[in-house]
Amino acid sequence: MTAPKNFHRYQLLAKRFLSAAKLPALLFSVARKRDKLGSGFSELSGQLKLLQALCLAWWRGEYRNVNKQALLSIVGALLYFVAPIDAIPDWLLGVGFVDDLAVLTWVLKTWSGELEAFERWRAGQSAQKLAEIERLPQLEGVEVVDRQTPGQP
């Protein structure tokens, strides 16, 4: 299965986000946008929570057993999700999330083995430990990422 068109730009941006330590701001933006989706997008919301949990566990240093390319693809997909202007702008009611779903589906299928391994790791953690790992960091003075476009960190 080939990557969605122009997705490589988001993977490059993901690399810059990771090296610039901007992952917490991105994850906060994902959570904000995910919370606005509503009940009609419960499956998408669940998929986003899984990707966000993996990123938080990686960022906190608790789970590093993830392929580097998988991590870049996951972060790239989350960047794509928060970008308001992408292949189909999110403000187009009814169709604005179609491209976001396509990108997330591609990431979930392409990296299913990595995500299954993460879910097995998660299952071995206590509820208290998971709550600590998956808690969003405090973002005092950090710019939230919702108006980023490819090519801008």
Image: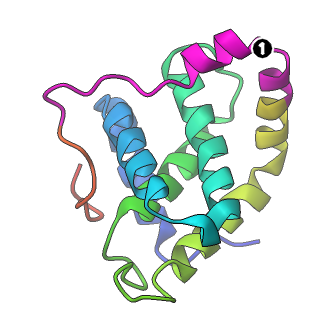
Residue 49 shown left or right of residue 135 in the figure: right
Asked if 138 appears above or below 128 in the picture, the reply is below
Residue 147 visible at all = yes
Magenta stretch contains residue 130: yes
Q: Position of residue 124 (x, y in %)?
A: 85, 16
Asked if 111 appears above or below 52 in the picture, the reply is below
The residue where tag 1 is placed is 125
Magenta stretch contains residue 140: yes
**Quadrant for the N terminus in the image:** bottom right
Number of numbered callouts drawn: 1
Q: Residues within 10 Å of mark 1 (few under 14, many from 20)?
A: few
Question: Label 1 amino acid?
Answer: Gln
* Front residue of 69 and 106: 106
Q: Residue at x 78, y 39 (%)?
A: 114
Residue 71, picture quadrant: top right
* Front residue of 98 and 74: 98
Q: Position of residue 72 (x, y in %)?
A: 53, 45
> Is label 1 in a helix, a strand or a loop?
loop
Q: Position of residue 133 (x, y in %)?
A: 57, 18
Residue 19, picture quadrant: top left
Residue 129 shown left or right of residue 75 in the figure: right
The magenta stretch spans which residues?
120-142
* Front residue of 133 and 86: 133
Q: Residue at x 75, y 50 (%)?
A: 111
Q: Residue at x 38, y 89 (%)?
A: 92
Q: Residue at x 30, y 23 (%)?
A: 138
Asked if 45 appears above or below 93 in the picture, the reply is above
Q: Position of residue 81 (x, y in %)?
A: 46, 63
